[in-house]
Image: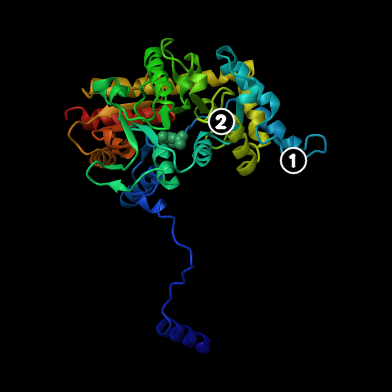
Amino acid sequence: GTLRSRCCKVRCVAAPAQEVTTGVKRNENIGKLQAGYLFPEIGRRRRAHQEKNPDAKIISLGIGDTTEPVPKSIADAMQKAAAGLATLEGYSGYGAEQGRGEVRQAICDRFYSHVGRKANEIFVSDGSKCDIGRLQMMFGASTSVAVQDPSYPVYVDSSVIMGMTDGYDESSKGFGKLEYMVCRPENDFFPDLSNARRTDLIFFCNPNNPTGAAATRKQLEELVAFARKNGSIIIYDAAYAIYISDPERPQSIFEIPGAEECALETCSFSKYAGFTGVRLGWTVVPEQLRYSDGFPVINDFNRIMTTVFNGASVVAQAGGFACLQDEGFKEMQELVAFYKENAAILRTTFKELGFSVYGGEDAPYVWVGFPGKPSWDVFAEILERCNIVTTPGSGFGPAGEGFVRASAFGHREDILEAVERFKKEFGGR
Ligand code: MLT
C-alpha cells in the first residue's frame, strides 16, 4: 500500500504527462472551420444552461429532430424484418449497394415516375446528409460551389473540409471562394441569379432549411435555366418536400423540364416518417446528367456508392418500403400534417406578438426576425428568459443574422407550453 502510493506520488511529480504526437499533419482544410458543427454547439449551450438552472424544464425548438413515434404499419414492417434476421429464411447479408430493387421501384413510383425518372436512377442510402458527403467526394476538391445564404451548414462545412474554399473571412463572415447566394425577405428568399457568379455546383435546399421558404415553379424554372446556361450542376435537397401544400410550388426539381440535364436530387425519410434515428434516404441521379466530357455522372455515383457504402440497413429498407405502400403513405402524411399544425401554432404566435415571421407553411421551420440583434444574443436571451432552445440564424450563414429558427418538431404539449412562454416573456416587449 505505502509503496504503491509513494510510487504514484513520485510518478505524478517527476513525470508530467508528456504529449505524444504522431507524424501526421492535420488536414489544413478542417482547420479552416471556425467552430464545431452547429447543432452539437447548441447542445453544449443547452447543457450549460441546464447545469446553471437544474430545475428548468427546457423545451427544444432547436435541432430539427422528429419526436413522434414511427407510424404503426411502418414500425411493424421493420419489426418483421428484424425478426426475420433471426431465421434461416429471413436472414440476409450484404444487399445491393444501390438499395433493394423493390424499394428503388417504390420510391420511383411514388415520387418520380410522373416526372420521367427511372428506378435505376435512384440510390437508396442511410440519409441525405451522408449522401451530401459522398457527392462532395465524387465531385472532388477542384469544383466551385454556391450555396443559398442562409443554408443547411453541411453544404458549407463539407465544402470547406474538402478544400473547395479558402479560409474564413472575419469581415464577411464567410469562406473565400464560396459563392453565397443571399436569400432574405427582400428577395422573397430566392437568390438574385442575375448577380450570382457561375460555379460548378449549386446546393439548393427546397423547401429551404432554415428559412422555410418554398420556391415557386417560376423561380425553379429560373434556377434551372441559370444552371443550364452556366453548365452547372444543382444538388437539389428535397428533404422537406412533403411539407409543401401549395400546388404552385414543385416538390421535385424534376418537375422542371430540362432539370434532368443539370440536377440531381437528394431526399430522406427522416422528416417524412420519423426516420432521423432509423436512417434511410435516397439520391436520384438522372442518366442524362453528364460531365463536360460527356461521361454520365450516374456511373461515378454508382462507383462511389459501391466503394464507400455497403447498402442501407435491410431493416430500415423494410421500413422505407412500408412508407411507400398505401397504408404507410397515409400514416406518413398524417405525421407530416401533425408537424405542420405545430408550425402553424408557432407561426401564428410569433405573428400575434408582432414579429416578422416567414416559413412554416410549406416547411417545418419558422423563421423569425429580430432585426438589428445578433442572433446568438437572441438565442441566449430566449434560452435565459423562456428556457427554450432555438437556432440562431447566423449559424446558417451571414445572411441569417437577425433571425432565429424555430423548429416545429415537438410534442404538441411542448409546442403549446413554448408558445405560452413566448407570450408571457415577449407579449409586452
Ligand atoms: C436541422 O435542424 O437543420 C436538421 O437537424 C438538419 C438535419 O436533418 O441534419
Quadrant the C terminus occupies: top left
Query: Which residue is most to the right?
Result: 88
Q: Is residue 317 above or below residue 218?
A: below
254 or 334: nearer the eye?
254
Q: Name the residue under label 1.
A: 93
Ligand 1 location (quadrant):
top left
The three-letter amino acid code for the residue at tag 2 is Val
Which of the two labelled residues, at mark 1 and mark 2, occupies the earlier sequence position?
1
- Ligand 1 within 8 Å of disc 2? The answer is no
Q: Can residue 306 be seen in this view?
A: yes
Q: Which of marks 1 and 2 is in front?
A: 2
Q: Is mark 1 on a helix, strand or loop?
A: loop
User: Residue shown at 41%/51% (left/top)?
Assistant: 30
Please state the horizontal and vertical placement of residue 60, each as a whole percent of the image.
Answer: 38, 37
User: Residue shown at 41%/85% (left/top)?
Assistant: 14
Query: Which residue is most to the front?
Result: 293
Q: Mark 2 points at which residue?
A: 297
The span from disc 1 to disc 2 (Cα, nearest Å) is 28 Å
